[in-house]
Image: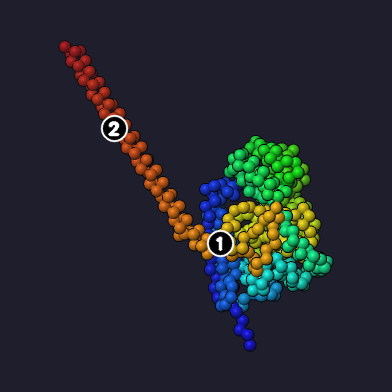
C-alpha cells in the first residue's frame, strides 16, 4: 500500500524591496511603496515544496505574515493536494474557520492570507503533476472546475448549472487555443512608463521604448493634480501616437463627482479606461462614474471578494474586470470571478506588477482563454518590468505578449538568495539601509547640536550685551541722580 505524502511544515518570510528609493510603483494614493511579499512555503515529506505569496507595499507585511502563520494548523499534517477535490476541500477549510472568518468575513487580511496558502497548494499540486498551473487547470473537466467554486452568495447571478454549461461549451476548442497560446503568447500592456513620481523626460522615454518593444497599450497613473495629468497625457499621446492605447489609473483617489470632472477633462486624449476611479467598495459609485463621463471603467485589484465582483457586474458598473492573483482567496475564488465575468460578457484584464503578481496572474488569464471565455479580444495582462529577476521561473514578455509558461507550477518560487538578501529586518539589504539611516540620523543630530550650540553662543553674546547695556544705563541713571541731588 502506497504511503501518502503529507505537508510537513509551513514557513513564512517577510521579504521587502526598497522600491521607494526610485519611486517605482508610485501613484496618487501610494507615493512611496516598498514592494513586499509575505512569502509562504509548504514543505512536504518528499519531493518539491509549494510556493505562494501575498503582495503588500511595505509596512504591515509582518502582520500579513502572522496571518498566514495562523492558518498552518489547517495545512500541516494533511495529505499533499493532488486533485480538484483536494484543492476544493483545502480552500473551504481555510476560508470557513468561523473564528478567523469573523475578521473579514471573507475579505481583508485573513482572506488574503488564505489566498497565499491556497495558491501555494496549487503550485504544489501542479508541480507534482508536471504541469504549469494554467495547463493543470485547463485539463480539468468542467465538472471538476465547478466543484472548485464556492457558489454561496453567487447563485442569484450565476448558478452551478450555468457555470457548467459555459465550461462545457468552451471545452471543444481547448486544445486548439492552448496550441495558439504557446505559439503566439497572450497580449500584454505595460505600466512601466507611467509611475507618478517619474519626471516628464523619463515618462516620454519609457513610453517610446514601450512602443518599440511591441506594446500596443501603456498606462499612466493620474489623480494628484489635474494640470499635471493633462500635461502628462499630452506628452504620452505625442510620444506614442494615436494608434497606441493609453489607460489611466487613479488608484481610488477620487469621489464620484471629482472622477467625472477629471475624466471629462482628460477625455480629449482618448484614455482607453479609467482604473479604480473611486473606492473599490463603492459599486454604485463606479456605476455613476461609468455613466457620467465618456471613458470606460476598469477595477478589481482591490476588490475584496467574489461578492463585490458580482455586484459590479450586476450593476453594469465596469467595462473591464481586473482580477488580482493575491487579493482574493486564491485560484478557487478567481475561478468564480472569471466565470462571473464570462456570464456577463465583460473582458478580464488582470492586474499585475508588484512582487510576483505578473508571474502568478498570467496563469489565470491563460486558463480563462483556454477553458472559460475562449477569447483574448480586448483583453490584456498588465506587465511591469520590476523584480522578476528574484524568481526562478520569471515571466517572459516578448513583442508585447506574455509567453506561455512551460515549467511546472505557479511560477511563484523566489530565489533563496533573494529571500535572504531582502528579508526584513535582518537581511543585509535592510541592515545596510538601517545603518545608513542611523549614520544620517547621527549626522543630522550632530548638525542640530552644532546649530543649537551656535544659537546658545548667540544668545549668550546677546545676553552679555544686554547686561552691559543695562549696567551702562544704571550708571547713567545714578550719575543723573547725583547731578539732580547737587
Which residue lies most toward the bottom here?
Answer: 1
Name the colouring of the figure. Answer: rainbow
Could you say which quadrant of the image residue 348 lies in? bottom right
**Image spot of residue 10 (x, y percent):** 55, 70
Image side of residue 350 versus residue 177, left or right: left
Which quadrant would the C terminus be assigned to in this image?
top left
Circle nearer the viewer, 2 or 1: 1
Which quadrant would the N terminus be assigned to in this image?
bottom right
Depth check, front residue: 77 or 354: 354
Which residue lies most toward the left here?
Answer: 486
**Image spot of residue 148 (x, y percent):** 71, 70
Tell me the residue that label 1 is attached to.
38
Depth check, front residue: 89 or 123: 123
The reply to whether residue 261 is visible in this rendering is: no
Q: Could you tell me how far apart the alpha carbons at marks 2 and 1 are, in whole angstroms?
A: 56 Å
Image side of residue 158 versus residue 121, left or right: right
Could you say which quadrant of the image residue 312 lies in? bottom right
What residue sits 57% from the left and 63% below the top? Answer: 414
Depth check, front residue: 485 or 88: 88
Residue 460 badge? 2
**Image spot of residue 368 (x, y percent):** 74, 62
User: Is disc 1 placed on a helix, strand or loop?
Assistant: strand
Classify 10 Å Cα crowding around label 1: few (below 14), some (14-19), many (20 and above): many
Depth check, front residue: 21 or 289: 21
What residue sits 37% from the left and 40% below the top? Answer: 447
Image side of residue 316 versus residue 422, left or right: right
The reply to whether residue 23 is visible in this rendering is: yes
User: Is disc 2 placed on a helix, strand or loop?
Assistant: helix
**Image spot of residue 439 (x, y percent):** 39, 48
Position of 28 relative to 408 (above/below): above
Amino acid at each position: 500500500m502506497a504511503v501518502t505524502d503529507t505537508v510537513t511544515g509551513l514557513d513564512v518570510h517577510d521579504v521587502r524591496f526598497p522600491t521607494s528609493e526610485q519611486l517605482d510603483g508610485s501613484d496618487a494614493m501610494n507615493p512611496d511603496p516598498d514592494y513586499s511579499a509575505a512569502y509562504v512555503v509548504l514543505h512536504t515529506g518528499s519531493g518539491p515544496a509549494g510556493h505562494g505569496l501575498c503582495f503588500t507595499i511595505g509596512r504591515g507585511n509582518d502582520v500579513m505574515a502572522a496571518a498566514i502563520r495562523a492558518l498552518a494548523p489547517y495545512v500541516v499534517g494533511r495529505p499533499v493536494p493532488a486533485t480538484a477535490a483536494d484543492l476544493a476541500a483545502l480552500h473551504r477549510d481555510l476560508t470557513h474557520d468561523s473564528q478567523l472568518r469573523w475578521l473579514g468575513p471573507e475579505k481583508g487580511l485573513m482572506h488574503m492570507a488564505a489566498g497565499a496558502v491556497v495558491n501555494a497548494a496549487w503550485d504544489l499540486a501542479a508541480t507534482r503533476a508536471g504541469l504549469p498551473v494554467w495547463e493543470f487547470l485547463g485539463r480539468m473537466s468542467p465538472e471538476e472546475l465547478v466543484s472548485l467554486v464556492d457558489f454561496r452568495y453567487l447563485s442569484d447571478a450565476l448558478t452551478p448549472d450555468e457555470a457548467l454549461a459555459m465550461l462545457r461549451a468552451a471545452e471543444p476548442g481547448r486544445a486548439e487555443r492552448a496550441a495558439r497560446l504557446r505559439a503566439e503568447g497572450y497580449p500584454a500592456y505595460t505600466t512601466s512608463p507611467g509611475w507618478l513620481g517619474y519626471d516628464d523626460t523619463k515618462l516620454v522615454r519609457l513610453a517610446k521604448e514601450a512602443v518599440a518593444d511591441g506594446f500596443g497599450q501603456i498606462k499612466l497613473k493620474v489623480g494628484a493634480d489635474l494640470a499635471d495629468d493633462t500635461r502628462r497625457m499630452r506628452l504620452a499621446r505625442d510620444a506614442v501616437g494615436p494608434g497606441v492605447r493609453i489607460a489611466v489609473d487613479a488608484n481610488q483617489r477620487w469621489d464620484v463627482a471629482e472622477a467625472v470632472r477629471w475624466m471629462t477633462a482628460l477625455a480629449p486624449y482618448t484614455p482607453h479606461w479609467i482604473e479604480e476611479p473611486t473606492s473599490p467598495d463603492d459599486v454604485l459609485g463606479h456605476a455613476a462614474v461609468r455613466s457620467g463621463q465618456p471613458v470606460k471603467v476598469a477595477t478589481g485589484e482591490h476588490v475584496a471578494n467574489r461578492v463585490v465582483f458580482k455586484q459590479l457586474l450586476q450593476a453594469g458598473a465596469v467595462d473591464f474586470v481586473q482580477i488580482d492573483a493575491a487579493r482574493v482567496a486564491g485560484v478557487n475564488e478567481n475561478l468564480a470571478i472569471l466565470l462571473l465575468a464570462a456570464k456577463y460578457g465583460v473582458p478580464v484584464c488582470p492586474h499585475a506588477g508588484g512582487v510576483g503578481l505578473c508571474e502568478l496572474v498570467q496563469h489565470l488569464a491563460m486558463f480563462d482563454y483556454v477553458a472559460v471565455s475562449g477569447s483574448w479580444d480586448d483583453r490584456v495582462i498588465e506587465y511591469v518590468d520590476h523584480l522578476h529577476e528574484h524568481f526562478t521561473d520569471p515571466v517572459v514578455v516578448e513583442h508585447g505578449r506574455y509567453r506561455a509558461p512551460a515549467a511546472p507550477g505557479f511560477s511563484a518560487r523566489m530565489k533563496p538568495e533573494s529571500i535572504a538578501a531582502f528579508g526584513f529586518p535582518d537581511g543585509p539589504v535592510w541592515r545596510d539601509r538601517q545603518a545608513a539611516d542611523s549614520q544620517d540620523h547621527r549626522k543630522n543630530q550632530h548638525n542640530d547640536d552644532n546649530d543649537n550650540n551656535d544659537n546658545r553662543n548667540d544668545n549668550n553674546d546677546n545676553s552679555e550685551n544686554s547686561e552691559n547695556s543695562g549696567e551702562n544705563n544704571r550708571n547713567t541713571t545714578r550719575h543723573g541722580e547725583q547731578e539732580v541731588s547737587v
